[in-house]
Amino acid sequence: MNEQLVSMITQLVIEKMGNQTPDEPSHETAVPIEDQKEILIKLQAKETSEADIVASPSAIERSNEPLIKLYHSESHNHEQLYYSASNNEPTDTTAPITAFKFEEDEVSESVQAAKKHTPARIGVGRAGTRPKTKTWLKFRLDHAAAVDAVYGEVTEGLLQKLDVFQVTTRVTDKEEYITRPDLGRRLSDESKTLIQSKCAKNPKVQIILSNGLSASAIEENVQDVYLALQQSLNNLNIEIGTTFYIDKGRVALMDEIGELLQAEVIVYLIGERPGLVSAESMSAYICYQPRIGTVEADRMVVSNIHKGGIPPLEAGAYLGTVVQKILHYKASGVGLVAKEG
């Protein structure tokens, strides 16, 4: 703003506040009253945008209020108007405001029917773009159980109950077991010696146990399955060899054991890879005369043995009838299917 105009306005403010008379100049460079009026008239249009106020000299002289109060009052009015517009009424009334509504818990009849036949996560719904809290927590719980199953160990108390001894593979720890399946398919040298010294040779049926990828599966199911299988084979007058437990074994390890003991049939109870539905699923692999080089097509499996799948006691009894059939046809896997057909 022009320096002379600033000086003039300051002088007028002081005069109106009664601090000095109009006849007494307040500064050596003060501008006369007549010149002040002329300057105001000339600069009125030019300075309006900077001062945000329009006032003539005569209006200023007639006003009983100081200019500072005039500025404050107008600023306050602007704020009040802005507040009223922003708080009392919406600026855009074209789109109606609707309250947020959570998704309905009810699902269609077809989804309800499907949920009765599978434990899979279907029809669980969502909250916005994310899973519901209950669903997410259940998922995290199942994942944690799966991890515990892989890294867990079978307790010594269970092995004592089953009256079995323990051997090991060439695996040194869990990390190596997961990354090197080939080492889990071979016995350690000490284990070979122990098996040959403790186990009966040329058994009709050799039962072996292993934690595999789920120690939880063995802890929960193997006792019922093993005892039911023993009873079933005894009722069928089928000879059973010396049962033992293998730590960190793989399925194909049954080939090397068959080679060592010359077993006619091997039943291998092993913990399966845990999923997000169950971390306690156990399987029973069965093979007729397994030897080094046996192909996978010659193996049979009864899987999904747990409380939510095939009941352990039922599975053990059923395995006895499968072994009887294998011994009768002297074949397993696709060979058994071909002979039965």
Image: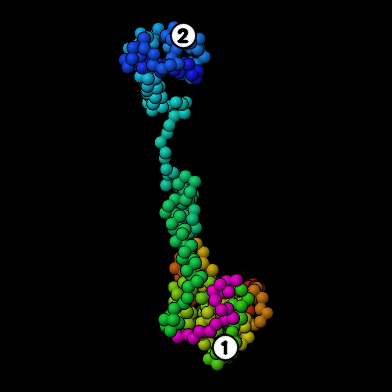
Which percent across, then down, holds residue 295? 66, 76
Whether residue 330 is visible, yes or no, is no
**Which residue corresponds to the image point at 58% horizontal and 74% vertical from the top-left?**
176
Q: Above or below — where is 57 with respect to 291?
A: above
**Which residue corresponds to the image point at 56% horizontal and 79% vertical from the top-left?**
172
**Which quadrant does the C terminus fall into?**
bottom right
Element assignment for label 2: helix
Q: Which residue is label 2 attached to?
A: 35
Q: What residue occupies the far bottom of the structure in this picture?
A: 197
**Which residue corresponds to the image point at 66% horizontal and 78% vertical from the top-left?**
294
Instruction: Residue type at mark 1: give it.
Output: Glu
Please state the extent of the stretch shown in magenta in the rendering.
162-179
What whole-number distance in Å separates the C-alpha atoms at marks 2 and 1? 117 Å
Query: Dot 1, crowdedness within 10 Å: few (<14), some or many (≥20)?
Result: few
Element assignment for label 1: helix
**Foreground label between 2 and 1:** 2
**Residue 266 numbered mark, or none:** none
Total of numbered circles in the picture?
A: 2
Which percent across, then down, holds residue 320? 51, 79
> Which of 214/328 is in front?
214
- Callout 2–callout 1 Cβ contact below 8 Å: no
Instruction: Residue type at mark 2: give it.
Output: Asp
Whether residue 38 is visible, yes or no, is yes
Mark 2 or mark 1: whose residue is earlier in sequence: 2
Q: Which residue is label 1 attached to?
A: 190
Q: In the image, 262: left or right of 123?
A: right
Which percent across, then down, holds residue 186? 61, 81
Whether residue 258 appears in magenta in the rendering, the answer is no
